Amino acid sequence: MRFNFITLFPNKILSYFKEGLQEKALSKGILDLHVINLRDFANNKHGKVDDTVYGGGAGMLLKVEPFHLALNSLGDKKGFVILTSPSGYPFSQTIGKALAKKEVITFLSGYYEGVDHRVSEFLVDVELSLGNYVLSSGDLASLCISDAVLRLVPGFLGDYQNSLEEESHNEEGVLEYPQYTKPAEYNGWKVPEVLLGGHHGEIQKWRETNRKKPVLKGIEI
């Protein structure tokens, strides 16, 4: 799989892929990574890629032209184009599975007040959001989505690839069962007895009927 990132801050992207499973994916050829600096496609000597909003309003918008030129520079390696945006469709495991079947994905990151609407209207295939909140950088959303997609690509998780079938959200809305490791008791907190007995049928039955419940303390939702 090939990932293209069009960003104002290439080092943010590159540093993420220098360690862990991401670095291994690069070294094994599972991932082909290309990071493009949006400022390289500014049409001015100062590398300015944003401007004020028509009609007035706070903040600055990223211009459509640099994105268009950056995408054109990729030629037939543009692939499926994603713009990360607070107003995008909520990203999900189902969307991640569909994206994992793509050969090439290009991520466009927004900043500041956002991007000229013509970027989403004419240049991208989908706008995706991580949730109902706003980040200061689209790079973080792009990296999160890329991670969720890449781990679904065969070979990325190595010997643990089969564990995907039992993860949370593998089925829409279904959470993984609770898991424990040694010691069996710590600080008075005990592992459920059924998991200690070695009876695989009973363990499987317990896992099917006991799913994680998200922890919520100290705030109201």
Image (cartoon, rainbow, N blue to C red):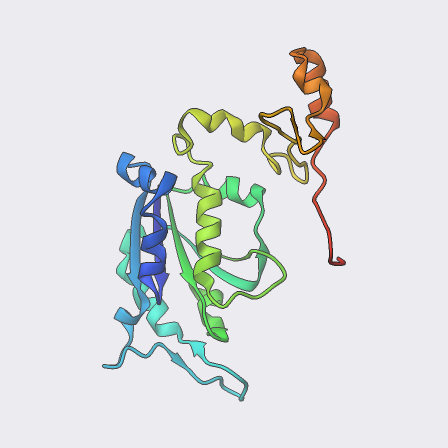
Whole-percent x, y for residue 207 in the image: 69, 24
Indicate the position of residue 158 as horizontal and vertical percent values.
40, 28
Most extreme residue toward the bottom, as rendered? 56
Point out the image quarter for the N terminus.
top left
Give x and y (percent) for residue 139: 43, 60
Residue drawn at x 32%, y 67% is 38
From the viewer's perspective, is residue 123 above or below residue 182? below
- When asked about the image quadrant of residue 62, the answer is bottom left
Q: Is residue 71 visible?
A: no
**Which of these two is toward me, 213 or 181?**
181
Residue drawn at (40%, 76%) of the image: 63
- Quarter placement of the C terminus: bottom right
Q: What percent of the width, then of the height, locates residue 22?
A: 36, 42
In this picture, residue 91 sits left or right of residue 188: left
Please identify the residue farthest to the left as the structure is shown: 45
User: What residue do we see at 49% from left, 68% from top?
Assistant: 136
For residue 85, side relative to residue 75 (left or right): right
Q: Is residue 120 above or below residue 145?
A: below
Work out whether residue 93 can be spotted.
yes
Question: Is residue 65 shown above or below 12?
Answer: below
Looking at the image, which residue is at 46% across and 65% down? 137
Q: Quadrant of residue 185?
A: top right
